[in-house]
Structure formats: C-alpha cells, structure tokens
C-alpha cells in the first residue's frame, strides 16, 4: 500500500509560481511512475506531468516550458514546479504513483490562480 500526501497549493496571482510536493509512504516495493494530474472545476482529471523511474519526464502541451516535474528517489517524493501560472491552471492537483501495476492517488491540493 502506498499513501500519498500533497502539499504546496494555495492562492497565487497570474504570472506567479508555486511548488507542489508529494511524499509517498507505507509498505511498498518500488514505485515506478509518479506524476501530477489537474482537475479544473467542472472538468475531468487530466495528466499534467509524469516522470517514470529512471526515465525522462513528459508534460501536457499546456504546461510545457512553464512546469517542471522532478523526483527525489531517496525520499520517495515528486515535485511540480509551476511558473508563469495562468487562470486556467486553477483546480485541484492530484499526485499519482504506480507500484506493481497499481495506481495510487493523493487527496489533492487546491491551486487558485487569481488576481
């Protein structure tokens, strides 16, 4: 079992930055992929960025050049650095981890981009 806890959300003005963190804990073998999903109000959850174990990250087109995903393997933590935030980035950000073919989700952290 993998428990995921996100942190770092909040209110930020357009053009600002936030850094999200997600720490994995519990009893597990090896976490393969970790990533972040975004759910805007009234919309479906969509992939923002993911980073496979030992691999290169991939991003949604809407965040390329603005967001950076990274992992600390020793801490089982994934980060999402979000720069040049836009109003459309508002929503709940969920951390995802995959371990032995099973998906795990955090409870989400709210990001609001507004002046």
Image (tube, grey):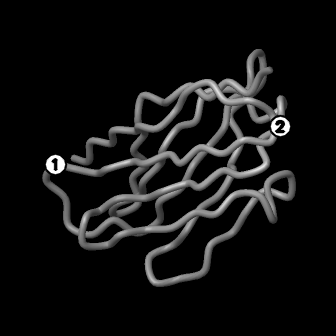
Residue, far left: 27
Residue 19 rendering spot, x and y as whole percentages: 53, 48
Residue underneath mark 1? 26
Q: Quadrant of the C terminus?
A: top right
The residue mark sitting in front, 2 or 1, is: 2
Residue 12 rendering spot, x and y as whole percentages: 67, 30
What number of labels is visible? 2
Few, some or many residues within 10 Å of mark 2 (<14, 14–19, 20+): some
Few, some or many residues within 10 Å of mark 1 (<14, 14–19, 20+): few
Residue 106 rendering spot, x and y as whole percentages: 41, 36
Q: Is residue 86 left or right of residue 16?
A: right
Q: Is residue 25 left or right of residue 95?
A: left
Give 73 or 3, whichever is nearer the viewer.
73
> Does dot 2 land on a helix, a strand or a loop?
loop
Residue, far bottom: 54
Residue at image point 13% right, 53% down:
27
- Contact between marks 2 and 1 (CB within 8 A): the answer is no
Q: Is residue 27 left or right of residue 80?
A: left
For residue 13, which quarter of the picture? top right
Residue underneath mark 2? 86
Residue at image point 52% right, 32% down:
9
Q: Distance between the residues labelled 2 and 1?
A: 35 Å
Residue 99 rendering spot, x and y as whole percentages: 34, 60
For residue 107, which quarter of the picture? top left
Q: In this view, does 105 lie to the left or right of 60?
A: left
For residue 81, which quarter of the picture? bottom right
Q: Is residue 14 above or below residue 48?
A: above
> Does dot 1 land on a helix, a strand or a loop?
strand
Residue at image point 79% right, 54% down:
63
Q: Which of marks 2 and 1 is nearer the N terminus?
A: 1
């Amino acid at each position: 079992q993998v428990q995921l806890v996100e942190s770092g959300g909040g209110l930020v003005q357009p053009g600002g930055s936030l850094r999200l963190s997600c720490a994995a804990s519990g009893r597990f073998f090896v976490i393969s992929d970790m990533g972040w999903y975004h759910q805007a109000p009234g919309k479906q959850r969509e992939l923002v960025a993911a980073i496979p174990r030992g691999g290169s990250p991939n991003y949604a087109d809407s965040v390329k050049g603005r967001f950076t995903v990274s992992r600390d393997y020793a801490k089982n933590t994934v980060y999402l650095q979000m720069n040049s935030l836009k109003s459309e980035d508002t929503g709940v950000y969920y951390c995802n981890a995959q371990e032995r073919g099973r998906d795990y989700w955090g409870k989400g952290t709210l990001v609001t981009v507004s002046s």
